[in-house]
Amino acid sequence: MSFEWYTDFVNESYKPKKTDVVCLFYFEPAKGISVKEAAGRIASESSAGTWTTLARMPKRIKGTMATAFDIRKSGGGYYAKVAYPIDLWDPGNMPQLLSGIAGNIFGMKALDNLRLVDVSLPPVYIKHFRGPQFGIPGVRKLLGIPRRPILASVPKPKVGLTTREFSAMAAAAWRGGVDLLKDDENLTDQAFNRFERRLDVCMKLRRTIERETGERKSYLLNITAETQEMLRRARLAAKLGNEYVMVDILTAGWAAVQTVREECEKLGLAIHAHRAFHAAIDRNPAQGMSMKILAEIARIQGCDQVHIGGLGKLAGDRREVRGIWEKVALQSVGESKVVLAQDWAGMKPLLGTCSGGLHPGIISRLVRLLSADIVIQAGGGIHGHPRGTEAGARAMRAALDAIADGHRVEDAARVHPELADALAFWGHGTPK
Ligand code: CAP
Ligand code: MG
C-alpha cells in the first residue's frame, strides 16, 4: 500500500470556481518525479497536504485541498494552474496567502525549479483590502497634473549628503520642473541627514518654490523602519504638511505595509512603494516569483505608486515592464500564456514608476510602451547633467512636456538648451 497521495490534488479538467484563488506555476520536475506527481506536490504542499497519507483525515478536509489542472509543456519545463478554495484563506491577511502559495513549495527536492508566474485573486478576496487611497486619478488631482507623466528625482549620491546639500539639490530639482522629490531606498534617518530635520527643511523650501513656480510639489519621503517607528514618521510627514510617504515594501514586509496603509487612511497620505529586494525574488526566470505579482499585491495593499522597471540600467524587458504596468494600471487584464485574467472589481489603479538609469534620451519609448500614466524617476539622469541639477531637471521636464504634446524630444531640444546639452552628453544610449 502506497503512503503517497499527491496525485489526489490533480484534476486536469478542473473548472475553477468564481471564488477560487488561482495560481499559474512554471516547474521542472526532478529526476524520477512524473509531471502529474510534481503538479500534485505543488497543489498539496501549498494547501492541506503532506508527504504521507494520514491515519486520521476528516472528510471535510477535501474542501480545503487545492487542485492542479491545465498542465502544459513549455521549453524545458511545464506550466500548471492550481486552484485554491476561498475557505483556505484568512480574509485580509496577505502574509498568510503568501505563506501558502509562495511558501514551502519553493524548497521541495522533487522540483529542480519552481516559479510562481501569476495569481488571480477573486473579488471576494480582494474586497478585504483597502487598495490605493489615491491611485492614478487621486495623485493627478493632488499634484494638479491632468495629463503628462509625473517627474520624480532622487538626489545623488544616494547617501552621505548632509541635509543642507540634499535640500539644495531638492530645491534646484523642484525649481527646474521636478514634481516629486524622492529619498533613495537606503536613505532613512542616518546621522549625516536626519529624517525630521530633512523633512522640515524640505517642507519649508517646497512652499517657497511652489510660490515661485506656481506648481504643486511633493516629497516621496522614505519612512522605512520598524513598524511603530514608521507610523511615527508618517504622522510627522502629515504634521509638517507632506502628502506622501515612501516604503521599501519588500524589506519592510507586507504586514507592516498594511499597518502603514491603515495609518495613511487616517492621515490622508499617499504611499510610494519602492521594490528594493525584488530582484532577489523575481530575477531568475525559472525560480521564485514574478514581479507582476509583487506589484499586484502592492495595489491590493493600497500603495498609490510602485516601481515597475524602466528599460534602463536595471533588468526587466519591454514585455515584463508592460505586463507589470497592465496589472497595476488597468481595471481588468485578460488571460494569456503567462498571465491570468484579473478582475479588479473597481479597485483604483496605481501609477507605475519607471526608474533606473533614465535620462531624456530614452524616456519617449516608455510613454509609447505604457502611456502617460506613469511616474518617471531620474536621479543620475538629472543630477549628472553637465550644467548641474536645475539644468538637468529643466532638460527632463522639457522632454516630458514635449512627449506629452506629441512632439519629438529632439525637436524640443532646439528651443531648450539644457535638453540639447543632455542629449549631447548622454545621447540615446541605455546605461549598462
Ligand atoms: C535610481 C534608483 C532607484 C532604482 C530602483 C537607484 O537611480 O534610485 O532606486 O531605479 O530600481 O538607486 O538606482 P538613478 P527599480 O535614476 O540614478 O538610476 O526602479 O528597478 O525598482
Ligand atoms: Mg534608489
Image (cartoon, rainbow, N blue to C red):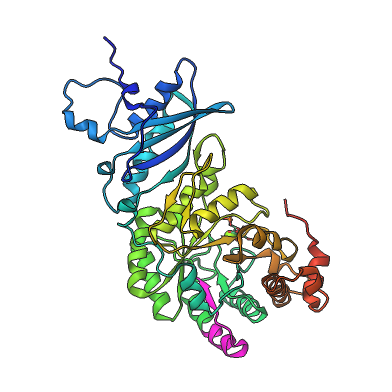
Q: Where on the picture, by quarter, is residue 104?
A: top left
Q: Residue furthest bottom?
A: 211
Quadrant of the picture in which ligand 2 is shown: bottom right
In-image side of 148 versus 133 (left or right) = right
Q: Tell me if I can see residue 201 in this picture.
A: yes
Q: Residue at x 72, y 75 (%)?
A: 398
Q: Residue at x 43, y 64 (%)?
A: 348
Specify the segment rendered in magenta.
204-221
Question: Is residue 331 highlighted in magenta?
Answer: no
Give the quarter of the figure containing the N terminus. Answer: top left
Residue 312, how many percent across, how many down?
A: 68, 55
Q: Residue at x 60, y 76 (%)?
A: 170
Residue 94, how many percent across, how many down?
A: 34, 50
- When the figure is inspected, residue 59 is found, relative to residue 300, above or below; the finding is above
Q: Residue furthest top?
A: 1
Residue 149, how many percent across, how many down?
A: 61, 69
Question: Is residue 208 highlighted in magenta?
Answer: yes
**Of the pair 56 and 385, the residue shown nearer to us:** 56
Q: Where on the picture, by quarter, is residue 51?
A: top left
**Of the pair 224 and 275, the residue shown nearer to us:** 275
Q: Where on the picture, by quarter, is residue 131?
A: bottom left
Residue 15, how many percent across, how many down?
A: 36, 35
